[in-house]
């Protein structure tokens, strides 16, 4: 590049960052670097090393379309997914592109040079375009519990599991009952002396039809496609019910039956029965969670944790339990701005997202030129597998970058009115879905009253929409001419062009 800037910097080497480099290279973009703060690739599947961690969508949907894998089971464990991601990265020569141990601390758009200035732990570098693939589920959420910091034993988050702590014969207090707790509680129950599970909100839990996949399945592409298709359409059928809540009762009945069959004790069953519609929170499937809660050494406390005093964990209802170890299963700060990202007018993304978190097609944010969020807000339904959305986004991102190159432009920025129109339509469509029957709070509400997570239409529509890149949605430009200097490009300096 004439200004010494890298053509594209990808921040993060998880599932999304890996796919980004592969897609960019395939489209002829070779000047690509990946900045990854950790020493290893793998993102979510590197960090979440808790016992029992695994995929909760069928594994065949949790793969790149260009790298089908012979999954051993219907739902893949963490180790197999991590292995798959690393093998795919290495097969595509990613090791050359990834700079490990480099954390991006701040990014600033240089409006004169039309590039991003990235301040990192390894110095400053510049990039013409940036793909932010830092992971919606990357930053653990730590609860603000008075006294927790004075607890005399080990305390750790499920996403940063402390494997040095042996739970054998220990009293473990688990704070939270989301997707991670549902996976690890059955795993730690047989070794722990006692497990006290604090539940502030009961979850809907569906049966999990996990089984070994015959190797022959993967040898016959037609059979494999049919099998994968069956998983895909099952997920889409559930998605349809979530968008039309009047159709949900059969699914709710199935979850209630699962609870009744697994938990004979009516009081425990009562405590585990949700008081909100199925689908308002992230969908959970497990055949082992409910049975684990019925074991003699496990106690469910249907209350949030109010405080910790010495070795005692105290519930809001006055429950007191003595614990040796506290495990926080309190989820993630989903989708918050990952670091200080200063746009064209110097405002940070966090600032402009304070009251609203809008992005055009979950990918571009007005005022933040040459930048893509992978993935950004409002791209997922309760049932879309992340790789499907990410690959669709990459099709879009590559189209934008090809247009930038082919047109000889140096900057593009989504038009605010296009972004606003998309946001208005999206929020209007969400109103009739089950996701928005919550009181404006809960899993999908990144901000009070604003659903910042969900895509209100089908996955097919998401893919189709992201596959048709419309240059007219953006303002395309070249750098403003500095006094006395020749224009950097042949067309008018500083010109903003609206494509026809
Ligand atoms: C326990 C768990 C189970 C899940 N199960 C499913 C599932 O079943 N199905 C599904 O579709 N999704 C699931 N998800 C969501 C999962 O996070 C995504 O599917 C996917 O892994 C996201 O990949 P990513 O690359 O976007 O983000 P990540 O995997 O989080 O990777 C982000 C990368 O960016 C790096 N990074 C972050 N900040 C910086 C910085 N400032 N500078 C440099 N590098 C940085 C991180 O170190 C990390 O390597 C699950 C998530 C969790 C936590």
Image (cartoon, rainbow, N blue to C red):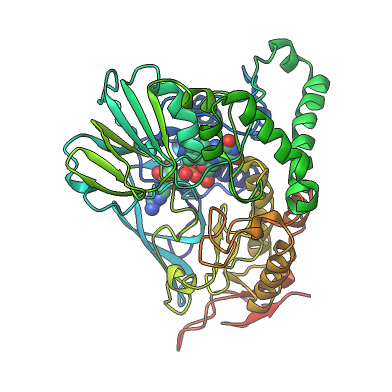
Image coordinates for residue 139, horizontal then vertical, percent:
40, 49
Image coordinates for residue 444, horizontal then vertical, percent:
57, 55
The C terminus sits in image quarter:
bottom right
Image position of 397 with respect to 424: above or below: above
Residue 499 seen by the camera: yes
Residue 42 seen by the camera: no
Q: Quadrant of residue 112?
A: bottom left
* Between 307 and 118, the one nearer to me in the picture: 307
Residue 320 left/right relative to 382:
left
Image coordinates for residue 477, horizontal then vertical, percent:
61, 76
Residue 21 left/right relative to 47:
right
* Residue furthest to the front: 266
Image position of 344 with respect to 313: above or below: below
Residue 105 left/right relative to 55:
left
Image coordinates for residue 319, horizontal then vertical, percent:
32, 42
* Residue furthest to the bottom: 483
Residue at left 60%, top 40%? 204
Image position of 207 with respect to 22: above or below: above
Q: Quadrant of residue 497?
A: bottom right
* Between 404 and 188, the one nearer to me in the picture: 188
Residue at left 77%, top 22%? 224
Query: Number of numbered discs present?
Result: 0
């Amino acid at each position: 590049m004439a200004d010494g800037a890298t053509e594209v910097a990808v921040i993060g080497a998880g599932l999304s960052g890996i796919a980004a480099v592969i897609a960019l290279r395939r489209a002829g973009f070779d000047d690509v670097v990946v900045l990854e703060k950790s020493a290893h690739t793998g993102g979510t599947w590197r960090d979440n090393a808790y016992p029992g961690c695994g995929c909760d969508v069928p594994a065949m949907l949790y793969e790149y379309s260009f790298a089908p894998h012979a999954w051993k089971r219907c739902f893949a464990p963490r180790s197999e997914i991590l292995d798959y991601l690393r093998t795919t990265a290495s097969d595509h020569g990613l090791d050359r592109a990834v700079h490990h141990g480099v954390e991006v601390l701040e990014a600033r758009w240089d409006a004169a040079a039309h590039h991003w200035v990235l301040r990192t732990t390894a110095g400053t570098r510049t990039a013409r375009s940036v793909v932010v693939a830092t992971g919606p589920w990357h930053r653990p959420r730590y609860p603000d519990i008075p006294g927790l910091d004075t607890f005399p034993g080990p305390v750790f988050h499920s996403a940063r599991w402390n494997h040095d702590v042996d739970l054998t014969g220990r009293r473990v207090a688990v704070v939270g009952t989301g997707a991670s707790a549902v996976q690890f509680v059955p795993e730690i129950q047989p070794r722990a002396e006692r497990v006290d599970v604090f539940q502030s909100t009961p979850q809907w839990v569906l049966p999990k039809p996990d089984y070994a996949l015959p190797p022959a399945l993967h040898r016959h592409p037609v059979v494999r496609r049919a099998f994968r298709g069956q998983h895909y359409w099952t997920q889409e059928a559930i998605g349809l019910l979530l968008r039309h809540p009047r159709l949900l009762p059969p699914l709710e009945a199935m979850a209630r039956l699962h609870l009744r069959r697994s938990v004979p004790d009516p009081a425990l069953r009562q405590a585990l029965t949700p008081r909100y519609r199925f689908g308002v929170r992230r969908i959970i499937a497990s055949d082992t969670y409910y049975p684990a809660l019925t074991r003699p050494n496990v106690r469910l406390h249907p209350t949030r944790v109010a405080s910790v005093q010495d070795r005692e964990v105290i519930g809001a209802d006055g429950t007191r339990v003595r614990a040796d170890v506290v495990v926080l299963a309190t989820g993630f700060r989903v989708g918050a701005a990952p670091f200080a990202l200063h746009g064209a007018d110097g405002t940070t993304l966090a600032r402009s997202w304070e009251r609203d978190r809008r992005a055009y097609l979950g990918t571009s944010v007005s005022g933040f030129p040459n930048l893509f969020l992978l993935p950004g807000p409002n791209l997922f339904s309760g049932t879309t597998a992340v790789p499907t959305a990410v690959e669709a986004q990459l099709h879009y991102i590559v189209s934008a970058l090809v247009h930038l190159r082919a047109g000889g432009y140096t900057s593009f920025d989504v038009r605010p009115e296009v972004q606003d129109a998309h946001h208005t339509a999206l929020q209007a469509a969400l109103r009739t879905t089950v996701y928005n029957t919550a009181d404006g709070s809960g899993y999908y509400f990144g901000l009070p009253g604003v659903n910042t997570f969900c895509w209100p239409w089908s996955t097919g529509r998401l893919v189709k929409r992201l596959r048709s890149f419309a240059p007219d949605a953006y303002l395309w430009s070249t750098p403003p001419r500095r006094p006395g200097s020749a224009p950097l490009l042949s067309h008018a300096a500083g010109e903003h062009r609206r494509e026809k």
